[in-house]
Image (cartoon, coloured by chain):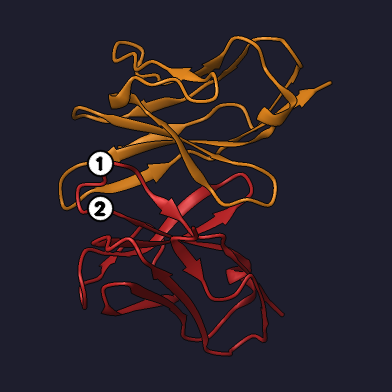
């Protein structure tokens, strides 16, 4: 009963490449989020979205952009990948009021070489 | 500043021993707090919410506004409790956004 699906489990990209991370949820949630997870730093919010075509910067948006053309899909874009963007990326979704907490995807481990 | 602090990166206990994972928060409003857990090779998932006052897998957490804490407790740890635990604070204003602590890795020894 997978509810938040991230398209890739592992990715290896070269420095300077444009990278797309895709996330799809089937719970009709209004909110979608992208976090990166790094040891000792926990989860840091990159971008989030309340609605289709809406996006808001999180705590660490530099070097990233997002796209939400459909309610169920939220894409994270690395315009020009750098080695310091090597990380685990987590997508999550929630109801608009976040009452029930977040549902997370299984993550994409991105390595930039 | 709004902040969630988990002072322990690693907590190691013996099976059957009590366990307490610490979480302190800094927030000017009325907080809403959560605990999330990530077992090895599994996705991050919600464990419990303070507003529900629930016990999940034997874990409980009480919000202490005076000490600004939301510690996660279990009286008798089990090996399957070994996981990464994150405390999270839901922020209000400018839309809801949840911030996470750095996490505590719990290791339960046989």
Res A55 seen here: yes
Q: Mark 2 highlights which residue?
A: A95
In this rendering, position of residue A19 left or right of residue B2: right
Residue A27 rendering spot, x and y as whole percentages:
32, 60
Q: Which chain is red?
A: A
- The answer to whether residue B63 is above or below residue A32 is above
Extreme residue toward the right, this view: B110
- CB atoms of marks 2 and 1 within 8 Å: yes
Q: In the picture, residue B107 is in which quadrant?
A: top right
What residue would you read off at disc 1?
A99
Residue B27 numbered tag: none
What is the tally of numbered marks visible in this picture?
2
Which chain does the numbered disc 1 sit on?
A: A
Q: Residue at x 39, y 33 (%)?
A: B34
Whether residue B59 is situated above or below residue B27 in the rendered picture:
above
| x and y, in percent, of residue A66 in the image | 36, 77
Task: Name the residue nearer the viewer: B58 or B30.
Answer: B58
Please give left or right for residue A57 compared with residue A4 in the image.
Answer: left
Q: Nearer the viewer, residue B44 or A13?
A: B44
From the viewer's perspective, tell me whether residue B36 is left or right of residue B62. right
In the rendering, what colour is chain B? orange
Please say whether residue B71 is visible from this viewpoint.
no
Residue B91 image point, x, y percent: 25, 41
Residue at position x 38%, y 49% in the image: A102
Structural crowding at the residue carrying mark 1, measured as other residues with C-alpha within 10 Å and reported as few (<14), some (14–19) or many (≥20): few
Q: Secondary structure at mark 1?
A: loop
Question: Percent position (x, y) of residue A74?
Answer: 36, 73
């Amino acid at each position: 009963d997978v509810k938040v699906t991230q398209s890739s489990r592992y990715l290896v990209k070269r420095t300077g490449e444009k990278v797309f991370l895709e996330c799809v949820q089937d719970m009709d949630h209004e909110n979608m989020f992208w976090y990166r997870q790094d040891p000792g730093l926990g989860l840091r919010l990159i971008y989030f979205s309340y609605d289709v075509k809406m996006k808001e910067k999180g705590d660490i948006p530099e070097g990233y952009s997002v796209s939400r053309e459909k309610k169920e899909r939220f894409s994270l874009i690395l315009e020009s990948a750098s080695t310091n963007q090597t990380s685990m990326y987590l997508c999550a979704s929630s109801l608009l009021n976040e009452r029930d907490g977040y549902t997370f995807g299984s993550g994409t481990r991105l390595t930039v070489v | 500043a709004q902040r969630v602090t988990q002072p322990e990166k690693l907590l190691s206990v013996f099976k059957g021993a009590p366990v307490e994972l610490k979480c302190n928060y800094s927030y000017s409003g009325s907080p809403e707090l959560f605990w999330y857990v990530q077992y090895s090779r599994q996705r991050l998932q919600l464990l419990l919410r303070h507003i529900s006052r629930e016990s999940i897998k034997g874990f409980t957490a009480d919000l202490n506004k005076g000490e600004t804490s939301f510690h996660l407790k279990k009286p008798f740890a089990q090996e399957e409790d070994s996981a990464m635990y994150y405390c999270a604070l839901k922020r209000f204003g400018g839309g809801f956004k949840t911030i996470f602590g750095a996490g505590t890795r719990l290791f339960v020894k046989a």
